[in-house]
Image (cartoon, grey):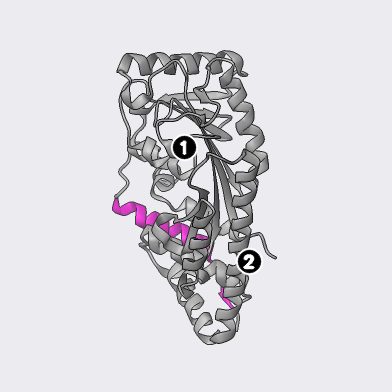
Amino acid sequence: MEETLVIASALTLERNDGGSVFPHAADDASREQLARRAVDHLSTNALPGEWDFHNLDDLSLAMRAYLVERGLMTPAFAEQSGPGRSLGVFRSGKASLEINGVSHLRILCSRPADRLLELWGLVDWLDDQLESEFAWAFDEVRGYLTALPEAAGTGLRAHLTVHLPALMVTGRLGPLAVRLQSDGFALAPVWEGAGGVFQVFNRATVGRSEGDLMATGLDFARLLAERERTARKWLFRENPSRARDYVGRALGVAQQAYSVGVEEGVSLISALQVGGDMGLTEPQFDSQSAFALMRRIQPGHLVVEEIRSAHGGLDEPAIDEVRARLLREAFAGTRVLR
């Protein structure tokens, strides 16, 4: 069984201070006080430079998008504003901390491939650091308490990103999604389904241990990866010329286009990764490299890393042109095998 199609993993952990009102119901002064406690405590007990804190209102839309794309901020938090809402970035992106979002504190951590155990070690350690300052809201029956009932329990959500274009094209994802749902997990598209990239995650956190949640999520992700591998082989066996034509057309656009939208760009990268995986192109393009390029061509990344304007707009025409240039450079030496 191939596991390379599990292209990324992430954990989020929700925690709330038992002596404070939930953020959505708290006033500005209360949120600011809690934020100061968190920032002062972590800054005092960490090595110099380990944490970099930002007031959410000081971050531009482009920078927020960039942080969301890197897995350091949730989309819902990026849309919030107001006093006391802050983001802490740990060790230049090894992890992050949302302060006064849905919960008082939310730890985020992500890595390439299926590295949940490694992530859990860091998340658990950061949880311990915060617990030395805060008394968590906890109930013997419900577990860790949150403003959202479905997030109570362990407070942990495991996210595994899987590349599933063949399952999407063949319509085989539906039954698999139902199977996940029956066990408390869900399958959701990333980038609105462009390129067949999906996330497996647990919908609830109560009634299961952290280890069980992560193990079950990883089992489902690996199952999907195995089924995807089978679907790719079936597609190529059924109509090899059509598969080669599909990959060749994608390569032609990637090598020649001068303006490419984000969804089209992700789909082109996906097609060329599948082509390399099926031996239709050289050099081959592994799923980890494909996912890294998919992320690199997102609007926030292009504005911050390529255009180098943290305050630039996310809908500038230049973004599509820069994206096309990156694709031309990435696939300049790629060719379809006959």
Instruction: Give x and y (percent) for residue 52.
Output: 50, 25
Q: Which range of residues does the magenta coloring cover?
A: 316-336
Of residues 19 and 313, the one drawn nearer to the viewer in this rendering: 19
Instruction: Give x and y (percent) for residue 217.
Output: 59, 51
Q: Quadrant of the C terminus?
A: bottom right
Of residues 162 and 299, the one drawn nearer to the viewer in this rendering: 162
Q: CA distance from mark 2 to mark 1?
A: 30 Å
- Residue holding disc 2: 226
Instruction: Give x and y (percent) for residue 115.
Output: 65, 46
Sort mark 1 into few (<14), some (14-19) or many (20+) by Cα contacts within 10 Å.
many
Placement of 68 over or under 8, stated as above or below: above
Report the amino acid beneath label 1: Ala
Placement of 202 over or under 88, stated as above or below: below
- Residue holding disc 1: 151
Direction front: furthest residue? 141
Secondary structure found at label 2: helix
Q: Is residue 183 located in the magenta-colored stretch of the structure?
A: no
Which quadrant would residue 259 be assigned to in this image?
bottom left
Tell me the residue at 63%/66% (across/down). Answer: 226
Report the amino acid beneath label 2: Glu
Secondary structure found at label 1: helix
Q: Quadrant of the N terminus?
A: bottom right
Of residues 5 and 256, the one drawn nearer to the viewer in this rendering: 5
Instruction: Give x and y (percent) for residue 308.
Output: 41, 41
Placement of 272 over or under 305, stated as above or below: below
Q: How many marks?
A: 2
Residue 304 in sight = no
Question: Is residue 86 shown left or right of residue 119?
Answer: left
Magenta-colored segment: predominant secondary structure: helix
Q: Considering only order in the chain, which callout, 1 or 2, is on the residue closer to the N terminus?
A: 1
Question: Is residue 336 shown left or right of residue 148?
Answer: right
